Amino acid sequence: METSQDSGLSALEIDALRRLAGVLIPPDAALAMPGADDPDILADLLATLGRDQARVQAALGALLAAGFAAAAPAEAETLARSRMATAGPEAGTLGRVILQCYYRDPRVLRALGQDPRPPFPGGHVLEQGDWSLLDPVRARTPFWRDDRAGAA
């Protein structure tokens, strides 16, 4: 499991993130689907926060300030859903990163009938289109500076 040093989040923020992810996307035993609070999904989320870290921390901070960490399960769910629906771009970023990591998980992709692999190099079949549609673009006078001219 990712530590708080690796992700840039405190232990309290990681616990809040885990709890929130489980509230937003709970596990479904009937469909054998993990919740977004699954350790593998949470580890992916923590490892890939990157440029979203500040907004995620701001959204988690607002949730924690509202008493999310100490709230009973039903109250935590109500609090999370109301805050996520009304809290602005930080909450939107937090929701996006949770969804992105959830739908990137191989178990979830298989359940959706998708092959859990990158699109390339395995590739997908792409039907050939009408390349003549690019002729007007090719015929246009270039509008960019050609840096290759002075590089010789």
Image (spheres, grey):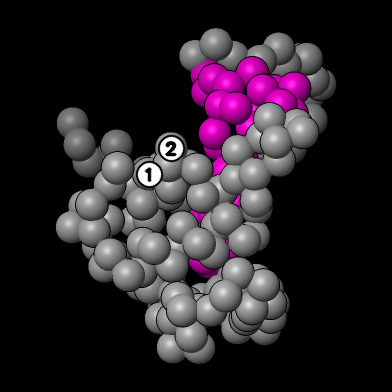
**Against 31, is 140 above or below?**
below
For the residue marked with disc 1, what is the amino acid? Ala
**Mark 2: amino acid:** Asp
Work out whether residue 116 or residue 77 is closer to the camera in this orientation and state it. Answer: 77
Q: Which residue is drawn at 46% across and 57% down?
A: 18
Q: In this view, does 79 lie to the left or right of 101?
A: right
Expressed as whole percent of the image width and height from the top left, the position of residue 33 reads 66, 35
Mark 1 → mark 2, Cα distance in angstroms? 5 Å
User: Which quarter of the figure is the C terminus placed in?
Assistant: top left
Disc 2: which residue: 40
Placement of 1 over or under 107, stated as above or below: below
Tell me: 62 left or right of 5. right
Residue 97 in view in this figure: yes
Please state which of residues 56 and 133 is positioned toward the viewer in this rendering. Answer: 56
CB atoms at circles 1 and 2 under 8 Å apart?
A: yes
Mark 2 neighbour density, 10 Å: few (under 14) some (14–19) many (20 or more): some
The location of residue 138, given as percent across then percent down, is 64, 33
Q: Quadrant of residue 146?
A: top left
Residue at the disc numbered 1: 43
Q: Residue at x 57, y 75 (%)?
A: 72
**Which segment is the magenta one?**
93-120
Q: Which of 88 and 110 is in front in this view?
A: 110
Above or below for 41 versus 134: below
**Residue 57 image-quadrant placement:** bottom left
Q: Does the magenta stretch include residue 35?
A: no
